[in-house]
Image (cartoon, rainbow, N blue to C red):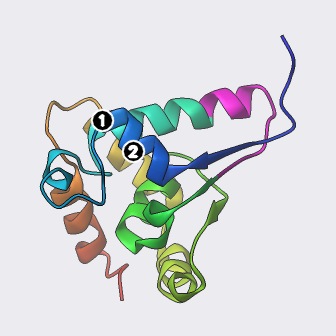
Amino acid sequence: VEEADFLSIGSNDLIQYLFASDRGNPKLNKYYDTLSPIMLRLLRDIVQRCRAASVPLTLCGEMASDPLEAMALVGIGFDSISMAPASVGPVKSMILKLDQSHLARFMKPLLDTPVKSLRPQLQAYADGRKLLV
């Protein structure tokens, strides 16, 4: 088995493949949420495997550009995300206020819940800590 020098996840394509749904089609985009426990568990598992193999990992795409979704990415262990320039300010502001280890502990049990989305719980977490601009 060959080793990789790095891994980069394109969140837009991964979400579309995972949910077998065209994110650009308004009739289908209601069938998935980037903050579903399934999506976040998959991404967390990739983070853990890359760390174990000492392979640098980054994620790019619309998911990293949304401050709430970026918060979830940090909570599952991402330390490198790429986004549109216009999103850097709001995401950076959120990250500077965030206690990553507290968020990770908060998220851990949520990832095993049978809900469609963790968006309400993560939004409440962010609101309670005034993390989002």
Q: Is mark 2 on a helix, strand or loop?
A: helix
Determine which of the numbered discs, if any, sits on residue 76 in the image: none
What residue sits 23% from the left and 67% below the top?
123
> Within 10 angstroms of label 1, few (less than 14), some, or many (20 or more) residues?
few
What span is in magenta?
A: 48-58
Q: What element carries label 1?
A: loop
Residue 23: image quadrant is bottom left
Toward the viewer: 22 or 45? 22
Q: Position of residue 13 (x, y in %)?
A: 47, 47
Q: Name the residue under label 2.
A: 15
Q: Where is residue 21 in the image (x, y as percent from the top left)?
A: 27, 43
Res 108 visible = no
Residue depth check, mark 1 versus mark 2: number of the one nearer the observer: 1
The image quadrant where one finds the N terminus is: top right
What residue sits 32% from the left and 51% below the top?
34
> Within 10 angstroms of label 2, few (less than 14), some, or many (20 or more) residues?
some
Q: Mark 1 points at which residue?
A: 20
